[in-house]
Amino acid sequence: MKTVEVQFIGALQFVARVLLLATLLLVGTHTDSHAAESIPFSVGEGSPANTYLAIWMAEEAGLYEVQGLEIHFVQMNGGIETAPQLEAGNIQLMHIGMSSVVRANSMGSDLRVIGSLSNIIRQTMFLAPGVRSAEDLHGRAIGISSAGSESDSTTTLVLERLGLTRGDVQIREIGRNRFDAVRNGIVAATMLGEPSRSEALAFGLTPIVDLYAERIPWLFSGLTVDRAYLGAHRDLVLRFMRATIEGNYIAITNEVGAKNVLEQRLSLTEGTIVEASYNNFKAETPINAEIDPVGAENIVAALASMGASDNIDDYIDLSITEELRAEGFFVAMEEKYGMRF
């Protein structure tokens, strides 16, 4: 790339960051009283995806700091790691789908999803090079991030559509980077969301079942806490949610800054992938992080064979959303950013 082009791109990134940080000057609602405090608040991160954009934007804009939270991120595989880490206090909140919560609570944990960053399944199953059909999957490895994760439960849905069962294949936990695993043939297939979904399409991998196209209601990307922690530290959870929701508003109204953050946080180099990831975020993210109960009900139904409770209130807590709505926070955000819903 020519020197002039590099300088130009660097200048654009600088301007985007300045515009993003300028939102600090606008922060006002429910923030000033916490500015002198600094309380550690750790968030577990599973597989990197565009569903984290609200959190990243809030961090970039300093919203957690203004709320009095010293935010830290802990990389995890999600799934079975979630409950032990939350219960031990190693993290205060986990970005994870509700499938993990159902599995954890069925084994004695007491977790609750208190907000959502995606209320539909946003994944597609891709085949590795040389794998051409469902018949080719018999006896082969299908990659998931970890047991109990959304990539695990959605894999089961895909197998059903293909006329297969989990017993017909090998389910293999491969961690966070599933795109490289399927691209290199380490597994025969795996579920991918953005930006890996667009990267797989660009690479020429074959999508065999596109659950995203089906728009299935699903509490796919939840914000999850331990119920005891919520009871003891409700104010901190409210602070986190205020900052995160405002991060959504910034991402929607500052497209240049949001794309810059996606590019940096997800190590994206292709503009078309950044564009696809941002458009997917903008189209599918509930801006006020509100949970769709239908998505929760679908997960409970899908995991009914586990013998878990079929009462969605055992897995979700809508009281944080209700409190924020009652205090006028959502209306304040709409007015602040010039948006109406």
Image (spheres, rainbow, N blue to C red):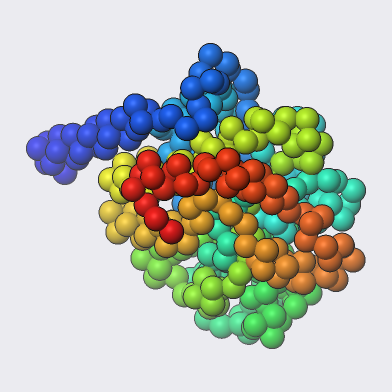
Instruction: Name the residue at 52% across, 71% down.
Output: 212
Is 213 displayed left or right of 261 in the figure?
A: right
User: Observer-nearest residue: 272 or 33?
Assistant: 33
Q: Quadrant of the C terminus?
A: bottom left
Q: Which image quadrant is residue 14 in?
A: top left
For this orientation, the residue located farthest to the top is 36
User: Observer-nearest residue: 190 or 296?
Assistant: 296
For this orientation, the residue located farthest to the left is 4
Q: Quick check: can you spot residue 96?
A: no
Is 170 displayed left or right of 253 in the figure?
A: right
Residue 232 in picture, x, y percent from top left: 78, 30
Q: Which image quadrant is residue 162 in?
A: bottom right
Is 242 displayed left or right of 316 in the figure?
A: left
Residue 80 in picture, x, y percent from top left: 76, 48
Q: Which image quadrant is residue 150 in?
A: bottom right
Instruction: Name the residue at 38% across, 45% down.
Output: 335
Residue 268 in picture, x, y percent from top left: 36, 48
User: Observer-nearest residue: 141 or 156?
Assistant: 156
